[in-house]
Amino acid sequence: KSTIYHGLNRKLELDHADILLTTYGIVRNETALFTKRKWLAVIIDEAQNIKNPNTAQTKAIKKINADVRIAMSGTPVENRLTEYWSIFDFVNKDYLGGLRYFKKEYAIPIEKFRDKERLNRLLTITSPFVLRRLKSDKRIIRDLPEKLEFDKYCSLTKEQAALYQNVIDQSMASIEGSEGIARKGMVLKLMTALKQICNHPAHFLKKKEADPNLSGKTSMLLDLLENIFANDEKVLIFTQYRQMGNLLVPLILNTFQMDVPFLHGGVPRKKRDEMVDDFQEKKYIKAMILSLKAGGTGLNLTAAKNVIHFDLWWNPAVETQATDRTYRIGQKKDVMVYRFLTQGTFEEKINDMLQRKKEVAELAVVQGEKWIGDLSNKEIRKIVELGA
């Protein structure tokens, strides 16, 4: 038997229950209640919730005394290798040494110097404790349909191309005259600016309305949505940026006379649950926009048959996690995944690098976009310049 410890009037009743279900937040707020007894097992789902070893939540979970510890996660590494250490430290304390030792032996050599020998050593010593299951393995899940992924390319409009070139000209002069942390910050700022321009000039210029004809991506989005809606299918649209989501909502409303919910970090929990339930159950709600961080985990949105990544994080783990809101157990239809890329820009070139070089792809998994800041001035200029 199981019991749920949650809600305002919660009571801890273990006399007639074998399994207790609760949340990370409750354990954080009531640590003493969970640490005063010994448990047979502690099993945590979405283990990336303890990826930061310094948070009160992580410390509370690690204090629980149990004979068996199991951590489950689709993305044990989202941005940096120390996240993997934190989860592993919960499962098998001190096996990978202290955090300082781990950084010196593995995190810095792998992330900064792309040391494949250290990466292979880390995989070798941790693999006996890791059970990996892929949805693509039909021996594991026989009835899950296919996931079909497509890279969809568009061109910059004249307005986008002018903005893009102007930002490169201004930024590269500063980058080439800087070094160290300051230079890395400038590179990441440049990437953000170019990504916003590729999304829509209004995004970069911080305007509140977007003409769909001024962006290759918005034109391509509306064409694709027309086909999806004509087939009476539902779609999830992911963007990294709340501002871009706010531009897409009226754009879709004006084109299709359709209200589209936008789930982002500012949506309260109760409203978020209502939005998910409505999308799953109400046939007239055909689309949902989600910010990648707020909507990329912990949601079940199997009513959607289509997923659109309007802009890319350059982190395959984060992208897959977002797609898995609909490509999960309970999905009955093949899932179509569309990744939007702007031709001839840094988007196409970074995507090609990740496809072509396995070691760069592995680095993207452990660093997100930060690895771009380690490239030379010549490499950065080659990536960002317009054209093939």
Image (spheres, rainbow, N blue to C red):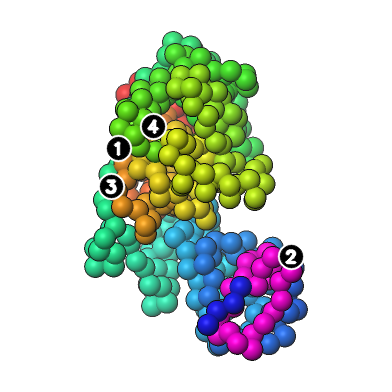
Q: Is residue 126 above or below residue 205?
A: below
Can the viewer see residue 353?
Answer: no
Residue at 58 percent of width and 50 percent of height: 273
Residue tagged 4: 340
Residue in the image at 68% along x and 87% along y: 37
> Where residue 64 sits: x, y (%)?
65, 80
Q: Secondary structure at mark 1?
A: strand
Residue 334, disc: 3
Between discs 3 and 2, the one toward the N terminus: 2
In this view, 146 is above or below 24? above
Tell which tag, 1 or 2, sits nearer the viewer.
2
The image's mark for residue 150 is 1
Q: Residues within 10 Å of mark 3 (few under 14, many from 20)?
A: some
Q: Amino acid at mark 4?
A: Phe
- Where does label 2 land, which residue? 8
Judge left or right: residue 227 versus residue 2: left
Secondary structure type for disc 3:
loop
Residue type marked 1: Phe
- Quarter of the image containing the C terminus? top left
Residue drawn where x is 59% and y is 77% of the image: 3
Q: Which residues are magenta?
A: 5-28
Q: Amino acid at mark 2?
A: Leu
Q: CA distance from mark 1 to mark 2?
A: 45 Å
**Left or right position of 49 against 237:** right
